[in-house]
Amino acid sequence: MDTRLDRDMSNCSIARTLEVVGEKWTILILREVWYGSSRFGDFERVLGCPRNLLAARLRMLVEEGILVTETYKEPGSRRRPKYVITPKGMDLVPAVMGLLQWGDRYRADPEGPAMLTRHRGCGAHVDAQIRCERGHAVQAEDIESVPGPAFRMKAAE
Amino acid sequence: MDTRLDRDMSNCSIARTLEVVGEKWTILILREVWYGSSRFGDFERVLGCPRNLLAARLRMLVEEGILVTETYKEPGSRRRPKYVITPKGMDLVPAVMGLLQWGDRYRADPEGPAMLTRHRGCGAHVDAQIRCERGHAVQAEDIESVPGPAFRMKAAE
DNA sequence: TTGCTGAGTATAGAAAAGTAAACTTAGGTG
DNA sequence: CACCTAAGTTTACTTTTCTATACTCAGCAA
């Protein structure tokens, strides 16, 4: 029997976020929402993702409050549902910007990235940065992780 | 035959980043590296992840240059490998901070998060933000995505 | 009333992930 | 020398996820 204690990371915020958006296709669906898609068929065509998974992921995103359904009506057709992002969904933008940025840096084609992100109005290039509450830009090496209020240890086995 | 053209997102930087870190366990392994783990057994114990998957994920992260192996020596034991993060790996920090932050906001225990991130030295809380090159803080709604140099359309089917 | 369309559901097979335990390897110890 | 340990590999099996394709459904139109 081992008397060593280990951190219990079952309440880790990273793990919990991944439970919601960590499955295949989920983040790519959100990407398409940001790029302007809203209909089932839009997602299917651009992503090439299986319909049953697409339906399952959209259902999950709606249940989690990341997307909501509204309806649209094409002339000569009946009303159909479309998917629109919520403020809770918009709060995932920094994480996805971080992924985008890493891919731009290390995995882009020789001629550059497929999409560019700009500050509407000012037009300058936009990226995800780490800052502290006092407004300092923070290098990744200068982040210190310390136990928070819900920190727990595993019981010894 | 459909003559409609769609965006070809096969060279999307988000998708390409997810090819590297989008599998189950990968980001959690990186989390443990940031929290101080470096040995095979550390990851196995804290994550509770199957050894064969852990070995596969570590191999992938080393191949991608996100981790490198060094050796350590415990007194009375032979030299064994350990895993250390590279600058390329540190560049994933903004993305993971974004996930952490979303989980802290929407999925934390009532008493708060399990871990806190602070600016070493100044001690203030740290988070991921979106900024433009001119230094303005940018709201997610004010990001504009436009085709970049490697933008492509799919051929009609 | 028959067909068309977008948005799904159903189902079956393939691939990946999870689980558990045995086996391997290479140096250090008694 | 046999034994111990950490770091894997291997194997066998179960479960879950993924993929592909067929099918359903609800209105609109001819």
Image (spheres, coloured by chain):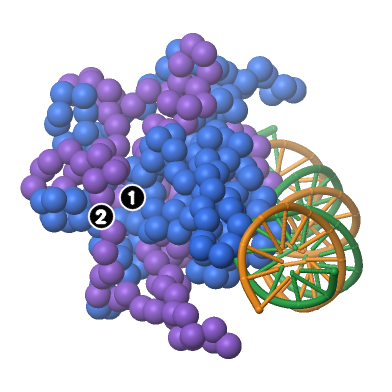
Chain colours: A purple, B blue, C orange, D green
Amino acid bearing label 1? Met
Q: Nearer the viewer, residue A5 or B17?
A: A5
Q: Name the residue at the left extreme.
A: A134
| Disc number for residue B7 | none
At horizontal 25% and vertical 55% (from top left) the residue drawn is A144
Q: Say few, some or many: other residues with alpha carbon within 10 Å of mark 2 (under 14 / 14 to 19 / 20 or more).
A: some
Q: Which mark is residue A144?
A: 2
Q: Badge 1 local density, few (<14 within 10 Å), some, or many (20+)?
A: many
The residues bearing labels 2 and 1 have C-alpha atoms spaced at a distance of 12 Å
Which three-letter amino acid code belongs to the residue tagged 2? Glu
Tag 2, which secondary structure? strand
Residue under the image location 35 percent in, 68 percent down = B107
Picture quarter with the N terminus of chain A: bottom right
Q: Is residue B37 visible?
A: yes
Closer mark to the observer between disc 2 and disc 1: 2
Q: Is residue B105 left or right of residue A34?
A: left
Say which quarter of the image contains residue A121.
top left
- What number is the disc on residue B97? 1
Name the residue at 21% across, 41% down: A138
Q: Quadrant of the C terminus of chain A?
A: bottom right
